[in-house]
């Protein structure tokens, strides 16, 4: 009988130690380091400067760049990381409401989709992107010089 009591006490002590360890591990893993954020790194080429972006929380971002010398816009959708499995990533760009002007690139990529280029000097653009089913877009932005409206 003494042996059974000792086993029970030892089992209880072991259970208590395991529970404390599990809580410590659980507490330590609940504070995760933030994922690296996607940044524009001249994926559109020389002469292009980033003028806008749309974050895709936890996944990456879509970047709009412009080349003042050529009047071309460029869109790149970048993942936060370029390691791991290839995911469905896409980028698109069009002159505002001109569906025939739409340029796009979609596919399975480890890093980014694009660059997608479009001549849109002085025009508003609609643009966006997608990473693994998460879609973001902006419409009628970065218009350049617009004719003044009557007052």
Image: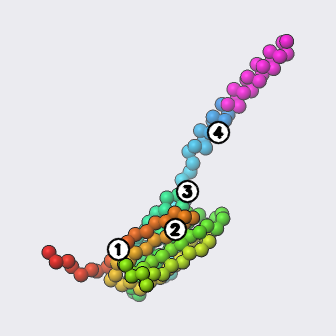
C-alpha gap between disc 1 and disc 2: 18 Å
- Dot 1 or dot 3, earlier in sequence: 3
Q: Quadrant of residue 28 in the image?
A: top right
Q: Nearer the viewer, residue 39 or 78?
A: 78
Give the labeled residue for mark 1. 140
Dot 3, how many residues are within 10 Å of its Cα: few (below 14), some (14-19), or many (20+)? Answer: few
The residue lying furthest to the top in this view is 1
Residue at 52% across / 63% down in the picture?
Answer: 134
Front residue of this view, candidates 11 and 137 = 137
- Identify the residue under disc 3: 35
Q: CA distance from mark 1 to mark 3?
A: 31 Å
| Eye-nearest disc, 2 or 4 | 2
Asked if disc 2 and disc 4 are in contact, CB closer than 8 Å, the reply is: no
Q: Residues within 10 Å of mark 1 (few under 14, many from 20)?
A: some
Disc on res. 130? 2
Look at 33% across and 83% down and name the residue there: 122
Q: Which residues are magenta?
A: 1-19
Q: Is residue 149 left or right of residue 98?
A: left
Residue lying farthest to the bottom in this orientation: 70
Task: Indicate which disc, 2 or 4, sits on the residue closer to the N terminus.
Answer: 4
Dots 1 and 3: beta carbons under 8 Å? Answer: no
């Amino acid at each position: 009988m003494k042996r059974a009591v000792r086993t029970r006490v030892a089992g209880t002590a072991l259970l208590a130690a395991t529970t404390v360890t599990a809580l410590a591990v659980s507490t330590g893993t609940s504070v995760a380091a933030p994922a690296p954020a996607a940044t524009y790194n001249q994926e559109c080429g020389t002469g292009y400067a980033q003028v806008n972006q749309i974050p895709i929380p936890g996944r990456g971002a879509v970047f709009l760049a412009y080349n003042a010398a050529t009047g071309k816009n460029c869109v790149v959708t970048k993942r936060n990381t370029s390691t791991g499995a290839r995911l469905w990533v896409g980028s698109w760009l069009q002159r505002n409401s001109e569906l025939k002007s739409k340029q796009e690139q979609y596919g399975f990529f480890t890093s980014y989709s694009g660059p997608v280029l479009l001549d849109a000097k002085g025009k508003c653009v609609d643009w966006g992107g997608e990473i693994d089913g998460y879609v973001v877009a902006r419409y009628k932005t970065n218009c350049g010089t617009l004719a003044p409206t009557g007052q």
